[in-house]
Amino acid sequence: MGAKQKAIKIILPIIILLVGIIVMRSLIVNRPVPQKQARVNPGALVKVIKAEKQDRQLKIFGTGTVQPEQEVTITLQVNGVINKVAPGFTAGAFFRKGELLFAVESIDYELALDRAKASLIRAENEITIVESKAAVARQEWERLKLKDQKEPNPLIVYGPQSEDARANRDVALANLKQAELDLQRTKIRAPFNCLVRSEEVGEGKYVRAGNNVAMVASVDAAEIVVPLPLDDLRWLSIPRQGNSEKGSTATVRLDLGGKMYQWQGHLVRSLGEVDMRSRMAQVVVRVEDPYKLLAEVNTQKLSLELGMFVEVVFQGETLTDLTEIPRAALREDSTVWIMDSDQKLKITPVEIIQQQKNTVLIGSGLDNGDLVIMTTLPGGTDGMKLRSVSEGESR
């Protein structure tokens, strides 16, 4: 390789490098100066709903267990052998008031009644005899009456004997009434329209007075004791004792396999005490004819049976100008966030009328058309700039 070629290899790269430096410097010197632009804060993106005032009937929700309006244990008052049992007298059977349930053999009590009648006849005859003797004795005393004696000695005119005879008659009459009562008690009848819950009777079984032999429950109505927060009672109509007016209506509901069964009832009373553990008041709902035994047409197959755990929905007072919002929109200290006309956050205290399962009913604090913020903003404060979801999407 010649000296000329070596010089070219050395000088050429240097020339290219210098040209590149000159071009780069020229670009740097001649580049346009960027203009400064003010950065605009678009605001936090939030989801809002529009507040709408309307009249609402408050609904109070509770739960309870169905129980009979009245339930009694049948206790025998006489001794004897059971000689008759009504057909179908077993747990789960229905009987109307006055129907015979079972009977105790009555021959002994019929004989006792005959003896009591005979004793009463003897006692009345004894009174007749004593009164006749007393009349004769008084006539004799009047005939032999001495001047210094105004009244005869009671023994002379059969006074004590007459009193004993009348007392014996009273005893005989009482024994007769007792014998009649014992005879009546050999036949056990339904005390009201009832459902047999349990029984321990059978033909030929010997029973003694004082034995509990059956338990029956009324089927004319069922009751449900419902615990409620004290605050909910102000929206309900609870009848006072002696007041014939009905209380708030109530719907009893039971969800079975996705199908909802319902029965109508009404609030009849409060138990008048607050549970010490739960701090809940207890009210009683009454449902008429839970087994639909009196209904001419029964469109619902399922009866409201004892022991069912049901939901009760009370129809409370109707209030005006209420706003319903989701529970997620309620903030701490009973406040709500709204987006004002300047698209800024405003923290507003509100009056909570009722908190339901998924919503809250607001009384005062919100106006018609207010935009209630649903989105949670960490560090949200009054005056924070906002933009709604729909606005953000359009941009």
Image: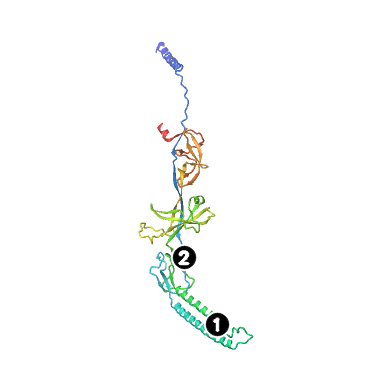
Q: In which quarter of the image is residue 149?
A: bottom right
Residue 265 point in image, percent of width and height: 43, 56
Q: Closer to us: mark 2 or mark 1?
A: 1
CA gap, disc 2 to disc 1?
Answer: 47 Å
Residue named by callout 2:
72
Question: Which residue is at a point 43% across and 35% down the rendered structure image?
Answer: 389
Residue 170 point in image, percent of width and height: 52, 78
Residue 387 point in image, percent of width and height: 45, 33
Looking at the image, residue 188 lies above or below residue 395: below
Along the line of sight, the residue nearer the viewer: 368 or 389: 368
Q: Identity of the amino acid at label 1?
A: Ser
Quadrant the N terminus occupies: top left
Q: Identity of the amino acid at label 2?
A: Val
Looking at the image, residue 38 lies above or below residue 265: above
Along the line of sight, the residue nearer the viewer: 256 or 136: 136
Residue 162's tag is 1
What secondary structure is marked by label 2? Answer: strand
User: Label 1 near label 2: C-beta < 8 Å?
Assistant: no
Work out which residue is located at the far top of the displayed protein and give it: 4
Residue 41 point in image, percent of width and height: 47, 30
Quadrant the C terminus occupies: top left
Along the line of sight, the residue nearer the viewer: 103 or 57: 57
